[in-house]
Image (cartoon, helix red, strand yellow):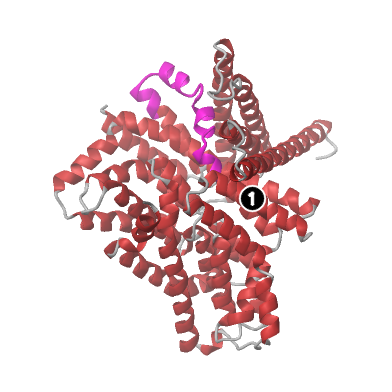
Amino acid sequence: MSGFEVAMLGFAAMLGLIALRMPVGLAMLVVGALGYIQLTSLQAFLSYIKTTPYHNFANYTLSVIPLFILMGALAEVSGLSTDLFRAARAWIGHRRGGLASSTIGACTAFGAICGSSVATTATFGRTALPEFRRYGYDLGFATGTIAVGGTLGILIPPSVILVVYAVSTEQNIVKLFQAALIPGVLATAFYLCVIAYMVRRNPGLAPPSEKLPMAERWRALAGAWPAAVVTIVMLGGIYGGIFTPTEGAAAGATAMLLVGLARRSIGFKEFGAALIRTAETTAMIFVILLGAEVFNAFLAFSQLPMEAAQAVVGLSLPPHAVLMMLLAFYILLGAVMDELAMILLTLPVFFPIITVLDFGMAPDDMAVWFGILVLIVCGIGLTAPPIGLNVFVVNAIARDVPMFATYRAVAPFVLADVLRLGLVVVFPSLSLWLVWLLTD
Amino acid sequence: MSDNPAAAASETGLRLLDRLARLLALFGGALAVCLALLVSVSITSRALGLGGVRGDFEFVQIGVALIVFTFMPWCQARRGNVMVHSFTARLPPRFQAALDALWEVVFAGMMALIAWRLGAGALEAARSSTTTMVLLLPVAPAIGACAILAGFTALVALAIALVRFRGRA
C-alpha cells in the first residue's frame, strides 16, 4: 500500500470510529499510532512516543491555553459577567430588544477576557437568562441570542481556537490576535443589527423594560471597572508587544484572581470550582492536541498533505474558488463536528493547499488571514444545526426551551456570519490592517 | 448490590479513585495559579527595571506538561472527552453504553502504553542527565511524574469501563 492509500484509509477509519462514539482525541491517537507503525515500524513508533507526549506539552506557546482558561474560569466564578451584563443593560437595556443587545455587548467584553465560547455561553446562560424570563422575552429568542453571544468568546481575542491554529500552522499568535479584533467587533455590530431587525419585525419577541436614571447608569458602568482593567492590561500588553501571550494570560489570570479576592467574590469554594473547571476544559483540549500530534506525524510520513496540495495546483482553479470550497467544507463539517478537532484534523492537509495558492499577498499575511476565516467558520459551526455546541450548552441550562426554538432564532445570526465571512474574504484588510498598523 | 462485599469494595475503590483524581486536578490547578503568579512577578520585576525571573519560561514549559497530566485523570473520571453522539443517538442505550465501555478500555490501553514509554523516556533522560538549557533543571523527574500520571489515568479509564460493563449486565 502506498502512503497515500494508507492515509486515506486512516482518515476513513478515524471518521468511522468518531461516528461510533469514540472520543475524537482517542480516535486520532489510535489511528495515528497504527498508521505510523504501518508506514515506519513498531520500533520507530515506540521510540517516537517515548518523549513526544511530554515534549509536545512542555511547550511555551501551548502554556497560553491553560492560563487563558484559568483566567476565564476565575472571571466566571467571580461574577464578572454579571457586572458586565448589568453595565450594558443600564445603558441600552431599555431600548427595544435591549436585553438581547445588552447580552451581546456584555459577551463582547467578556470575550476579551475569556477565550472559550462554551464558557461564555454557559456564563451568560446563567446570568442573562433569568432576566430574559423576568421581562417576558420570547425564550427561543433569548437562548438563541445567548448561544450566538457565546461565540464572541472565541471571535474576540484571546481565543483558544486561534492559539491552536497558530501552533499547528506555526504562525505568530500575536498577529492572529490582532487580526481577529476588527472582524470580532464587526461580529458584535452585525449581531446588534440582527437583533434590531428581529424585534422590529416581531415586537412580541421583546417587551420593553424600564429606563434607568443617569446616576444608576454610571454606577453600573463603574461596577464593570475590573473587567476593563484586566482587558486593557492583558490585550494592550500583548498587542503592544510588551509581553508574550503567555505573559499576558498569566498577568490576566493573576489580575482576575486579585480582583476577585479584593471584592470578596472569590472565596475558597469559588477558587476550587475555577480550578476544577480549568482542569476539565484544559484536559479535554490537550487530549485532542495529543491525538492530533500523533495523527499528523502519521500524515507527514504518508505524504498526503503534499500530494493533495500538488493535486489542487494541478487543477489550476482560481485561488478564490479553492478557498470557497474549503470554507464551504468547513461549514458543513463544523455543523456535525467539534470545531477544535475539526481544525486540528484538516489543517495539516488544507494549510499546505492554501499556502501554494496565490492570493496576491505575502505568505505570512495570507496565513493570518486564513486563520481568521477559519475562526469565523468555527463560530458558525458552534451555533449551526444539527450540532451547535453553544446551542446544546444553553439548552442544557434552559431545559424548558425546545432546541428547535433556539435554532430558529440563531438562523438570522448565522446568515449575518456568512455575510461577514464573505466580507473578510473579499476585503482581507479587514483582518490584516490592524496587524500592519501594530507591527513595524 | 451493597449486599455483595466484592461490589461494595469495588465501589469504595471507585470512590477513592474519583477522590484522588479530583485532588490531583485541584493540585494541577494550584500549580497553574503558581505559574501565573511566577510569570506575573517576572513581568513586574522586568517592568521595574530589575530584570525578569531568570529562566521563568523553563518553569512554564515543565509546568504545562505536569499540569496537563494532572488534569487528565479527572477529565477521564468525568468522561469529559469530546465525542460525537449524532450518529449513534438512535441506537439502543445498552449498545451505546457497550461502545463507550469499549472505548474506555482502548483509552486505558493507550494511556498505559504512553505511561510505559514515558517511563522509558524518563529513565533515558536520567541516564544521560538531560537538563533544561538555562536553569539546568533535570528533566527526568518531570517526565517520570507524567508517566505515573498517565498510568493513573489508564487506571481510572479501566475502572470506568468496568463499571459500565457491569452496569449493562
Note whether B86 is above or below B117 in the view shown: below
Residue at 47 percent across and 36 percent down: it is A291
Q: Can residue A115 be seen at all in this image of the molecule?
A: no
- In the rendered image, residue A165 lying in the magenta stretch gets the answer no
Note whether A336 is above or below A278 in the view shown: below
The percent position of residue A282, horizontal first and vertical second, equals 59, 44
| Residue identified by numbered label 1 | A253
Magenta-highlighted residues: A35-64
Residue at 54 percent across and 18 percent down: it is B121
The percent position of residue A340, horizontal first and vertical second, equals 47, 49
Furthest residue toward front? B49
When asked about the image quadrant of residue B99, the answer is top right
State which chain disc 1 sits on: A
Residue placed most toward the observer, A363 or B107: A363
The percent position of residue A159, horizontal first and vertical second, equals 50, 53
Residue at 61 percent across and 27 percent down: it is B146
User: What amino acid does circle 1 point to?
Assistant: Ala
Left or right? Give the position of B77 relative to A29.
right
Q: How many marks?
A: 1
Residue placed most toward the observer, A128 or A385: A128
Residue placed most toward the observer, A228 or B4: A228
- In the rendered image, residue A62 lying in the magenta stretch gets the answer yes
When asked about the image quadrant of residue A417, the answer is bottom left
Note whether A231 is above or below B43 in the view shown: below
Query: Looking at the figure, which quarter contains the N terminus of chain A?
Result: top left
Label 1 sits on a secondary structure element that is helix
Classify mark 1: residues with Cα within 10 Å, few (<14), some (14-19) or many (20+).
many
